[in-house]
Image (cartoon, coloured by chain):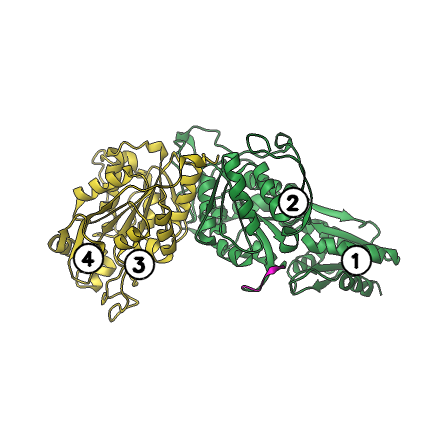
Chain colours: A green, B yellow
Amino acid sequence: MSSNGQVSGEFFLSGDEACAEGALAAGCRFFAGYPITPATEIAEHMSERLPEVGGTYIQMEDELASMAAVLGAAWGGAKAMTATSGPGFSLMMENIGLGVMLETPCVVVDIQRAGPSTGLPTLTGQGDMMQARWGSHGPYSIIALSPSSPQEIFDLTIKAFNLSEKYRVPVLLMSEEAIGHMYEKVMIPPWEKIEVYPRRKPKVPPQEYLPFVPDDDMVPPMAIAGEGFKFHVTGLTHDERGYPVMTPEAQDKLVRRLVDKIEKNRADIIEVEENGIDGAEVVVCSYGISARVSAIAIEKARASGIRVGLLRLITAWPFPTERVREVARNIKTFIVPEINYGQMVFEVERAAAGRAETVLVPHMGGAVHDPQTILDAIKQAVK
Amino acid sequence: MKTTEMTTLGAHPLDEYLRLDRLPHIWCPGCGLGTALGALLKAVGKSGLDIDKTVMVSGIGCTGRAAGYVKLDSFHVTHGRALPFGTGLKLANPDLKVIVFSGDGDLAAIGGNHLIHTARRNIDMTVVCVNNFTYGMTGGQMGPTTPEKGRSTTSRKGNIEQPFNIPRLVAAAGAVYVARWTTIHLRQMERSFIEALQKKGFSLVEIISPCPTYYGRMNEQATGLDQMRYYRYNSVVKHGAPLDTVDITLGGQIVVGKFLDIEKPYLPQKINGHGR
């Protein structure tokens, strides 16, 4: 570690630790959280490391407060993050909505465990994927990423911060216990080699600044507290001045932009990993730990002569509809393994729009799939 | 609809602290919120604070609208979460002076857990809790401070719960400065605000305030004036009063004054750095 708290090189880290280090490398200097299995290690690591880089860790009284403090810190000028799991994620939904409405850059990490409710706290799950998309009330769009290894959780945490600053939206990093507690080699580049998206500061003097006049990409520059801009922001529907306006017209203008700034920049945001899709008859569409387990089934299927590809969702939200639709034209079946009773599969089915059959391989949670169940589904599809 | 033409009477001394393009405000005739906010802004002016670094956070409710009227960096956030939002602001940028201006329902019911924990941590911020004993914005329901037997739209026959004594609660939780005034105590209120703003640590001033539209009307004080008269004839100034003696009862005495003014370590500490 250098004197300013930077670390770089090769490390043997858990996914949780890699996530924390990714945040620090991305410039995160504020963490507010509440202990929860299996995300606690992120808070522990941040509590130790943040002071070393001049940042602040605070343990809040609950996840409602954690999320509120993260938003406050972002408006105070810090890059800010929290980390939680299902039960805490539910509580954070309230202020994730406020984050969307105030267009507040921040990162929320959900190390998913098996639910509903307290469920299996120490065991893996992928049951929060739809909550990530729709969990807060009202119409909005959000960005959610899904890493498949400790190295990727490091990389995607950086990407999450960059996307949150670029699009001024809370970005959700949807991982799982299986990745959070997995130890693997993680390569941390020197921080100066890491691309970091800076805060979009106002380009006009305070007297001309209107908080919600967007740039060409539909995202407005953001003043921070204490710099003389004297801005007002509210969770109420507001105009470009940030003032409440209680009309359907103001609602239409604001909400349309909040959604469009994500949906119309899909090409810039969305990332997928593809393997052997050309000429495939069956494509396994999965994400996170389940994509990794699928790789074993795919290898075995290929060994028995089945033409099978992998489409891994690195970006879960916005959903890569266009790519899935394109792939659907040339294949017979999508196999969708996920550790829930069907969530992202509905999106695959919607995007495929009948061009390809969609088969869910569910797992109720508490473990990853037996690759054999995925292999069986692949074999069944080509029968 | 009949509209009344407004005449420009010249500048008001508090104009520089108000978003004039947002006036008139939404508060009812007889409401005490304007009085409390006016006194606070006067105190901000007199306290020597750097206005650029002074921010206001409000939650939801009638009082929660205050943040939208002040010409400061101001945040109108979710119901009950003004304190943790303010905690994030302050810890990320310790140069800020954070003022939380919100109501009794917002701070003591839905935000009650945050109230005791922000006081426990002794976060360096000033809280103004405007207590009108009811949820005004939603039409006059009982709340965490409604006195026993107090009537509301959800306690038509009288409240059967015991209310919070807010000064006692926050003092027990760890605050360093606690005062209470009613909206008739304009100068005392302003003095307390100045002291609270200059205090290091968690300071809270409770302002007992009329809500003639709902609470007053349902509890035999139908106008703002009736409520102000009640405050005038029933308030007793007792600085340093033992906090178990300052409970508020229906139609009873209201003990006001500065109850607590002590020194304790607070957050953020200098060693935490700026987090930027």
Q: What is the C-alpha distance between the residues marked 4 and 1?
A: 72 Å
Q: Does residue A302 belong to the magenta stretch?
A: no
Q: What is the C-alpha distance between the residues marked 2 and 3?
A: 51 Å
B265 to the left or right of A260? left
Which label's residue is closer to the chain start, 3 or 4?
3
As helix, strand or loop, the secondary structure at mark 1 comes to helix
The residue carrying pointer 3 sits among few (fewer than 14), some (14 to 19) or many (20 or more) residues within 10 Å by Cα, namely many
Q: Name the residue under label 2.
A: A13
Mark 2 vs mark 1: same chain?
yes
- Quadrant in which residue A367 is drawn: bottom right
Q: What is the C-alpha distance between the residues marked 3 and 4?
A: 25 Å
Magenta region: which residues? A118-124
Q: Are marks 1 and 3 in contact (CB under 8 Å)?
A: no
Hey, which residue is sitting farthest bottom in the picture?
Answer: B157
Q: Do the residues labelled 3 and 4 touch (CB within 8 Å)?
A: no
Q: Residue A297 carries which label?
A: 1
* Residue closest to the eye, A101 or B145: B145
Select label 3 or label 4 by which is in front: 4
Q: What is the C-alpha distance between the residues marked 2 and 1?
A: 26 Å
Q: Which mark is residue B135?
A: 3
Select label 2 or label 3 by which is in front: 2
The residue carrying pointer 2 sits among few (fewer than 14), some (14 to 19) or many (20 or more) residues within 10 Å by Cα, namely many
- Quadrant in which residue A113 is drawn: bottom right
Query: Residue B236: image x %, image y %?
Result: 13, 52
Question: Looking at the image, is A318 positioned above or below residue B139?
Answer: above
As helix, strand or loop, the secondary structure at mark 4 comes to helix
Q: Residue A173 carries which label?
A: none
Q: Which amino acid does label 3 sit on?
A: Tyr
Q: Name the residue under label 4.
A: B245
Mark 3 vs mark 4: same chain?
yes
